[in-house]
Each structure stands twice: as structure tokens, then as C-alpha cells.
Amino acid sequence: DTEVTQTPKHLVMGMTNKKSLKCEQHMGHRAMYWYKQKAKKPPELMFVYSYEKLSINESVPSRFSPECPNSSLLNLHLHALQPEDSALYLCASSQDGVFRGDSPLHFGNGTRLTVT
Amino acid sequence: SQQGEEDPQALSIQEGENATMNCSYKTSINNLQWYRQNSGRGLVHLILIRSNEREKHSGRLRVTLDTSKKSSSLLITASRAADTASYFCATGTNTGNQFYFGTGTSLTVIP
């Protein structure tokens, strides 16, 4: 079992739907991340929050909207997605706030998203 | 892309044999980490090696780092069927809050 909890595990949505992915950690970690992973590919960094502030946005389309309501929670709001956005969405956290790769990432098991 | 590359892309060995996978990266790093991913699951951290270290051990894992060649290797000794997974290297940069994964090696250990 992982200490980072992601819900839902699976999500099917139409291109006109609005949905949200949720991520929660209670390890007191100061940085939280969203990654996108296509089949047989490595995870691709999308967003990084450090001390609840958005630190990195890797040129992600605006149909993906992250939110960090508090230090334990991370959301990813989805709207008007395309079929090519279907992927495994992984949330991770790390102890360091200003992350310099000195502490490991702790991953959730992901949300398998299918856009129809 | 700052993504690193790993080789081989896929590796199939018999149980008990050793498995070696290599990672090359492009930018200066603070350190390099290795992760394992079982099918359809999240990634699990295996080991971290800092830029001023050349070799590190953890159980059956041995990691080397050559910053002059911008490369690292992961050796799994006495492999087990449970080691079957994808393995990714990941680099932490000096600029902070950026953490990029290599292309990955799919390891199959045949019982």
C-alpha cells in the first residue's frame, strides 16, 4: 500500500465533461506533483506545488487545472479533454519543499483516465 | 526534453541471474534516483545516489554514477521473479522542483 492516496482509481469521461482527480498525503511533505504516463512510456511531469504554491507548470494545456487546497491535498480539474489525454495520472509527494532531488518521490497508484 | 535514456528497453533473464540496466542523462544533476514500477501501479523509490558518489549499494541493488559521462547503471543481483517490473532512472537538477524520468527498462525474470 502507498502513503499517497489517489481517487478515483478509474475514470471514464466524455469530451464535454468536467471531472476532478484527487490526491492526499499525510506524511507532512511540502511538495506535491502531477505526472502523466502513457502506456510503455515514462512519467511526464505536469505540475509541481511547493508549500501549496504552484512552482512548475510544464506547458500543460489549460484544460488541465491543478489546485492545492492545503498541504495534504492536491486536485487536478479536467475539462474538455481529448481522447489523446487518456493516460495514467500519477500524484507524488516529496519531503522537501524547494525540491532539489535530495529526497525521494512517494507515488500514489494513479488514476486510469479514459476520455471517450 | 531533459528526459534521460535507458538501455536496454527490454531485458529478459532467468531467475538467479544478474540484471544490468543503464541510464544516460543530459543535464547537470544533484543526484540520480532509481524507481521500480509494477504494471499499472505507481512508482516505488529504490535508491538515490548523489553527484559526489560513484557507487552505492542497497541489498541486492548496486548503483554506479559517472558524472563525466552523464551515465548511471543499476545492477540487480540474484534476480527473482518478483523483480519483474519496469525500472526508471530519474534526475534531480540544480534548479529545483524539476524531476525527470528516463525512458525505462522493462525487466522480465523467468522463474
Image (cartoon, grey):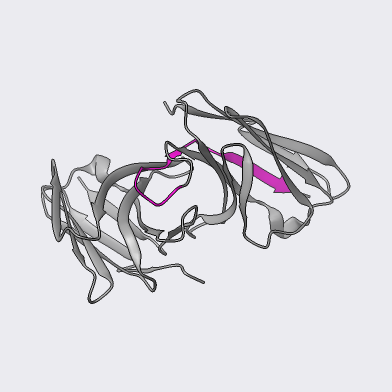
Residue A106 belongs to the span the image colors magenta:
yes
Instruction: Identify the residue at horizontal 22%, vertical 50% (top origin).
Output: B110
- Left or right, A92 with reference to A46: left
User: Which residue corresponds to the image point at 34% horizontal and 48% vertical from the top-left?
Assistant: B35
The answer to whether A17 is drawn above or below residue B56 in the figure is above
Q: Quadrant of residue B59?
A: top left
Quarter of the image containing the N terminus of chain A?
Answer: top left
Which residues fall within the magenta stretch?
Answer: A99-115
Name the residue at 17% across, 58% down.
B53
Q: Quadrant of residue B111?
A: top left
* Percent x, y of residue A4: 49, 30
Task: Please determine whether, in this image, residue B61 is positioned above or below residue B66.
Answer: above
Q: Position of residue A42 (x, y in %)?
A: 47, 58
Residue A99 is left or right of residue A62, and the answer is left
Q: Is residue B21 above or below residue B38?
A: below
**Residue B78 versus residue A46: which sits nearer the camera?**
A46
Residue A43: % across, % down: 50, 55
Residue located farthest toward the right when viewing the structure as drawn: A16
Percent x, y of residue B30: 33, 59
Q: Dividing the picture into quarters, in which one does residue A69 lie?
A: top right
